Image (cartoon, rainbow, N blue to C red):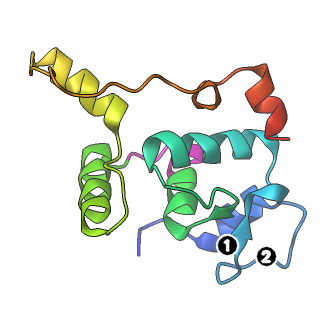
Amino acid sequence: EVEGFHPNQILSILYPNDPNIHPNMALTTNHLSVDHRLLHHLIVHQILPTGGGYAKLSRMQVFIMWCILSKIEFCFPLLILKTMVRAFSQKKSVLPYGSILTLVFLHYHIPLEGEISTKLKKEDTYNKSTLNRMG
């Protein structure tokens, strides 16, 4: 429980045209506005990276959307740590936040020789085409 967080309230913001939506339903992105789809895309690729299943919203993703839309601060370093621990404990998982960690390592002059770099894919950047694909 988080003070001020009411799942029905954020769901009425995310799904204004569906009065029957409730927190126990499977939530999907196809009925979100373009702005909310973009926010969800940023969350699942940058803030709370997942390995797929981008068409559905998790409770944590909805909570983070509420925090951002309501301008509620949350502890991003703790979120990163918990996400990394969860990824490490899964059998088939890639360590998340590679781009952020690389910047931190470079800032503190941690040598990265021998590491294999990966170039950003076209779909990892935001442009007009990316936004059009979101609806």
Kind of element beneath mark 2: loop
Pick the front one: 82 or 113:
113
Q: Callout 2: few (<14), some (14-19), or many (20+) C-alpha neighbours within 10 Å?
A: some
Image quadrant where residue 2 sits:
bottom left
Closest to the observer, 95 or 43:
95
Residue that badge 1 annotates: 8
The residue drawn where x is 37% and y is 64% is: 92
| Front-lying residue, 1 or 45 | 45
- The circle drawn on residue 112 is none
- Mark 2: amino acid: Ile
Q: Secondary structure at mark 1?
A: helix
Q: Nearer the viewer, mark 1 or mark 2?
A: 2
State the residue position of label 2. Answer: 21
Q: Position of residue 65 (x, y in %)?
A: 57, 52
Q: Which residues are magenta?
A: 67-73
Picture quadrant of residue 42: top right
Residue 108 position within the rendered picture, expressed as x and y whole percent measured from the top left? 10, 19
